[in-house]
Image: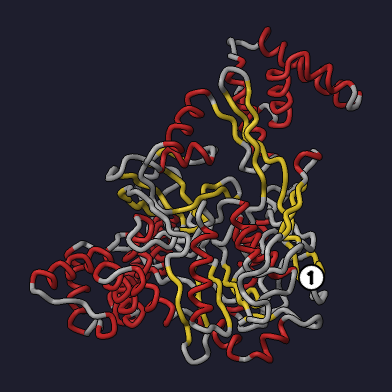
């Protein structure tokens, strides 16, 4: 008998019985006889397991399996810390340890990159980790069933040490390994601010996190842009994983009038209920148009800010539906220096929308529904049919300002939807192996020895330099499978299985068409190999732009990197178009506005 086969629900209550002892039973009598009777039955089961099972089962083992059971019906942020695990976590949070520059979470109980922090030259940026990447292994150890906090401790380590993670990426059929060298991650909440359009006076602020000094950095940026006479502002919260609640409130106050609700929390306990309102005069004039950029990597505090701005009709939200991390965790101490981290409340926007995305529904999870929906959309696209009317059901709410209809499905649904950017297999491999960054480091070093100084406005990746990069990649043994090659490989393997003698698997059964089939397959394989070689030409302009960003980041610095990146950003282009057209901007914030996509 395998203990894991004991139902998760039963083990949860056994876990409670173990931890609570007689107090739990006495306490729950008042809460309902049914619950009390259930606990008695489970207590009886636990005693019988301890007394009659074929081998002795330590009580602590039942606790461990109970946690596994809890994770099956509760959210993935629920965690149980053994004494050693808890001590290690506390040591790492207090000391200076190297990291990767990513924010991670659990999606369908799979360790997932919420967002790589947009820090040039961070370990994550060097290898091109993306929002939504699923981490299946850490140093060859499976992450299945791994607690989030334990995963964090395994990913962290001394500066300069290395960690290998196995990644499953949307659109990439094969799991692949990435080796990263840990580094000290120092984050400025506002790594860049400036003007997107001098003539139209459109300002821009990139906000990457909500830490202790975020409000101070935001205040400096807003005041500097006001001095430049901005007529409108873009606040970029894309791939911002969140942070401190008080900083989310403070940032919201820069844009909202006093006494406006920003967020509230609600749980089962009265102690978990709290309301947070603006208490200061906004720093940015309410008459100045505001546009907020979000994507699937925007989480937690980012969702609080964007939700408050949307619900008060203070600005337009553009991008993709956000991550949906809107829960409050409480550390509950247990005996013998152990602890239970439990979700005790959810965050709600002023209109009443729950920010937290449903992780576990009865039956099918929302993420499974999303995958089925994407499959349906892909089928319609391939058939050339309309996809605009296909979507997951969303609950409608009304904004507190003009009464616009906004939607809730976990996370913040933008007013203007953008198509999420995708990467070609070649780009993914170049980023995964950090070849763009390595080439830039090598070439910039050569330039410095020759006394050549990079100039931002004159930097061009010429055809000659691009050819050098291709040669560099070949020297580094760049190799990867295109989606077509992966399918082809699976087809060939299936063909071999079909030909194998089921009575004697060491022999193949031949047929009259085998030779012709093999010849055609060989020809097709050669054509696909040629097409893969052509990928450097097919994606030339895109890769040249990625190389330019790498050269700017390595050779000049962060500001140059952002200035160039923003020039070729579809989200930024859409934002500028809206802010240049005041009539359109105002129409989006009217009661009769109908959600649209770009």
Instruction: Answer with left or right where residue 206 lies relative to residue 314.
Output: left
Vertical arrangement, residue 508 with respect to residue 457, above or below: above
Q: Find residue 597 and report its image quarter.
A: bottom right
Q: Say which residue appears at 51% left-offset and 60% top-offset.
A: 216
Q: Which of 348 and 84 is in front in this view?
A: 348
State which quarter of the image contains the C terminus. bottom right
State which quarter of the image contains the N terminus. top right
Q: Which of 419 and 175 is in front in this view?
A: 419
Residue 227 in percent (x, y) is at: 50, 79
Instruction: Answer with left or right where residue 387 lies relative to residue 117.
Output: right
Instruction: Answer with left or right where residue 567 lies relative to residue 532.
Output: right
Task: Examine the rendering and report whether any part of residue 378 can be seen.
Answer: no
Residue 589 in percent (x, y) is at: 73, 80
- The residue beneath circle 1 is 399
Q: Find residue 550 and report its image quarter.
A: bottom left
Task: Examine the rendering and report whether any part of residue 209 can be seen.
Answer: yes
Q: Say which residue appears at 83% left-offset and 23% top-offset.
A: 38
Residue 126 in percent (x, y) is at: 33, 60
Work out which residue is located at the far left of the displayed protein and give it: 450
Vertical arrangement, residue 96 with respect to residue 80, above or below: below
Q: Which color mode does the image show?
A: secondary structure
Q: Which of 155 and 522 is in front in this view?
A: 155
Query: 10 Å neighbourhood of mark 1: few (<14), some, or many (≥20)?
Result: many
Instruction: Answer with left or right where residue 408 lies relative to residue 416.
Output: right
**Tag 1 secondary structure:** loop
Q: Say which residue appears at 70% left-offset and 28% top-offset.
A: 12
Q: Say which residue appears at 21% left-offset and 77% top-offset.
A: 454
Work out which residue is located at the far top of the displayed protein and give it: 51
């Amino acid at each position: 008998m395998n203990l894991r086969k004991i139902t998760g629900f039963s083990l949860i209550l056994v876990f409670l019985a173990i931890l609570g002892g007689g107090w739990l039973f006495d306490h729950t009598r008042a809460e309902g006889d049914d619950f009390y009777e259930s606990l008695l039955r489970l207590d009886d089961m636990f005693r019988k397991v301890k007394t009659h099972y074929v081998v002795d089962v330590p009580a602590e083992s039942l606790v461990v399996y109970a946690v596994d059971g809890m994770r099956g019906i509760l959210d993935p942020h629920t965690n149980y810390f053994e004494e050693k695990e808890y001590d290690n976590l506390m040591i790492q949070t207090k000391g200076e340890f190297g990291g990767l520059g990513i924010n991670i979470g659990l999606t369908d109980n799979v360790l997932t990159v919420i967002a790589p922090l947009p820090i040039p030259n961070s370990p994550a940026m060097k290898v091109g980790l993306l929002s939504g990447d699923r981490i299946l292994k850490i140093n060859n150890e499976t992450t299945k069933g791994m607690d989030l906090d334990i995963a964090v401790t395994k990913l962290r380590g001394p500066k300069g040490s290395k960690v290998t993670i196995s990644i499953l990426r949307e659109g990439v059929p094969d799991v692949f390994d990435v080796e990263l060298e840990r580094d000290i991650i120092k984050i400025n909440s506002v790594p860049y601010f400036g003007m997107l359009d001098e003539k139209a006076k459109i300002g821009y602020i990139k906000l990457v996190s909500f830490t202790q000094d975020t409000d101070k950095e935001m205040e400096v940026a807003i005041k500097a842009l006001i001095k430049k006479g901005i007529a409108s502002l873009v606040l970029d919260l894309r791939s911002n994983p969140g942070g401190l609640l008080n900083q989310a409130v403070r940032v919201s106050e820069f844009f909202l009038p006093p006494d406006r609700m920003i967020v509230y929390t609600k749980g089962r306990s009265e102690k978990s209920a709290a309301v947070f309102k603006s208490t200061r005069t906004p720093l940015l004039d309410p008459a100045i148009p505001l546009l907020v950029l979000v994507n699937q990597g925007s989480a937690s505090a980012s969702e609080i800010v964007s939700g408050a701005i949307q619900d008060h009709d203070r600005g337009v939200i553009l991008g993709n539906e956000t991550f949906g991390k809107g829960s409050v965790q409480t550390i509950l101490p247990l005996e013998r220096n152990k602890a239970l981290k439990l979700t005790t409340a959810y965050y709600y926007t002023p209109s009443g929308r729950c920010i937290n995305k449903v992780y576990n529904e009865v039956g099918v999870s929302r993420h499974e529904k999303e995958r089925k929906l994407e499959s349906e959309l892909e089928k319609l696209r391939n058939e050339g049919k309309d996809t605009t009317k296909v979507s997951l059901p969303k609950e409608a709410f009304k904004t507190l300002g003009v009464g616009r209809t906004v939607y809730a499905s976990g996370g913040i649904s933008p007013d203007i939807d953008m198509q999420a950017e995708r990467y070609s297999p070649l780009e993914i491999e170049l980023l995964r192996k950090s070849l763009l960054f390595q080439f830039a480091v090598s070439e910039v070093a050569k330039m410095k020895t020759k006394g050549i100084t990079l100039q931002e406005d004159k930097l061009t990746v010429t055809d000659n330099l691009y050819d050098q990069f291709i040669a560099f990649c070949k020297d580094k043994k760049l190799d990867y499978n295109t989606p077509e090659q992966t399918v082809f490989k699976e087809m060939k393997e299936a063909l071999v299985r079909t030909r194998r003698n089921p009575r004697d698997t060491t022999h193949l059964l031949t047929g009259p068409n085998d030779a012709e089939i093999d010849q055609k397959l060989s020809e097709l394989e050669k054509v696909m190999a040629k097409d893969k070689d052509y990928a450097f030409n097919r994606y030339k302009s895109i890769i040249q732009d990625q190389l330019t960003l790498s050269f700017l980041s390595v050779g000049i610095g962060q500001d140059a990197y952002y200035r160039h990146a923003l020039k070729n950003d579809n989200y930024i282009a859409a934002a500028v178009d809206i802010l240049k057209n005041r009539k359109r901007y105002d129409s989006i914030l009217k009661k009769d506005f109908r959600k649209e996509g770009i």
